[in-house]
Every structure is written in C-alpha cells, then in structure tokens.
Image (cartoon, rainbow, N blue to C red):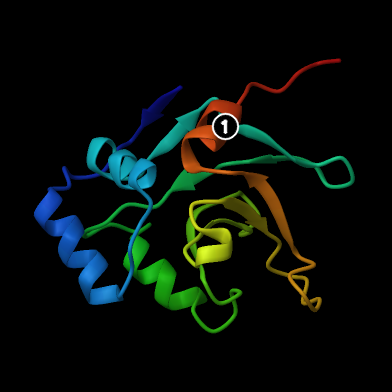
Amino acid sequence: MEIQGSCEVLTESRLRDFEGINGLQLPQQYREFLLKHNGGYPKPYYFTISREQGMGMVNVFYGIGEMYDDLDNKIHNFDEILEAGFIPIADDSGGNQICLGLTEAHFGHVYFWIHDEDPEDMGNMFFLSKDFGEFLERLHEISED
C-alpha cells in the first residue's frame, strides 16, 4: 500500500499534545501511521463493508495540523452525531466515515459509519477489522469478477 499526498511531518510531541488536548489515547498502529504519513490518499483504496453493503473506498485519511482534512476538526464536527467512543479517521467519497473505536469494548477496531442513516444500537456502523493494521492490509484494487 502507498499513501499519496501525506501532510506535514507530525512529531511524537505534537501527537501527544493532540491526544492530551482531546482526551484520547490512540491505538499504537494508528499512532505509527500518523507519525509516518499524517493522513493522505491510499492506493489501493477499496475495502469490503459487508455482504449486504458491498464495497467501500477510502477517499482520504485525516491528518493533524493546518490542513483541510484535519483530524481535530473532524472529531469536533462529528462529536454530537457519531456514536460515543468512536472518532472519524477517514472518509469515503459520499461523506461516510471510517471510524476508530476508542472505548474498551471497541478499542482499536475499525468501523464504517453511514452518515445518512440514524438507526438505534449502532445499526449504521459496520465492523471492518480488529485493528488499524488489518484494515490497511485489507485495502485492495477493485476486482472485476
């Protein structure tokens, strides 16, 4: 996998400040991704949501700093509407969010959140992977089967 359009270099100190200001503890694999890439456009970018939902795609991973797709802004923009204990880390071309679980029950797990559905009990959240590294490994080119 490659990341294009990475943002400004992120330091460990700035990442710790970000976590402290937002009261977050990010999973290690995701922290390493931010320190290496600080957001950007993945290639390949397709993933399977579920049998019923089909395929999804990562438009852009958010980064930390002065940029359009700033993780801090995205967290605050979705704070009131996204299920508690999750933060958006990327989006698809339709504004749906790829989210990271931060509570004990979901810590490190990656989910797909459909923004224009409002069901009870996380019915619009689809489990994608047990951790961020696995999610990256599952990104693929579209198959023509």
The amino acid type of the residue labelled 1 equals Tyr
Single out the residue that lies furthest toward the bottom: 80
5 displayed left or right of 100: left
Q: Quadrant of residue 14?
A: bottom left
Find residue 15 and report its horizontal and vertical position in percent: 20, 56
Residue drawn at point x = 38 percent, y = 30 percent: 3
- In which quadrant will I find the C terminus? top right
43 displayed left or right of 72: right
Counting every numbered tag in the picture gives 1
Closer to us: 102 or 115 = 102
Q: Residues within 10 Å of mark 1 (few under 14, many from 20)?
A: many
Res. 139 visible in picture: no
Residue drawn at point x = 62 percent, y = 24 percent: 140
56 displayed left or right of 76: right
Res. 112 visible in picture: yes
45 displayed left or right of 17: right
Residue drawn at point x = 80 percent, y = 67 percent: 123
Find residue 39 and report its horizontal and vertical position in percent: 35, 44
Residue drawn at point x = 50 percent, y = 58 percent: 107
Label 1's element?
loop
Residue under label 1: 45
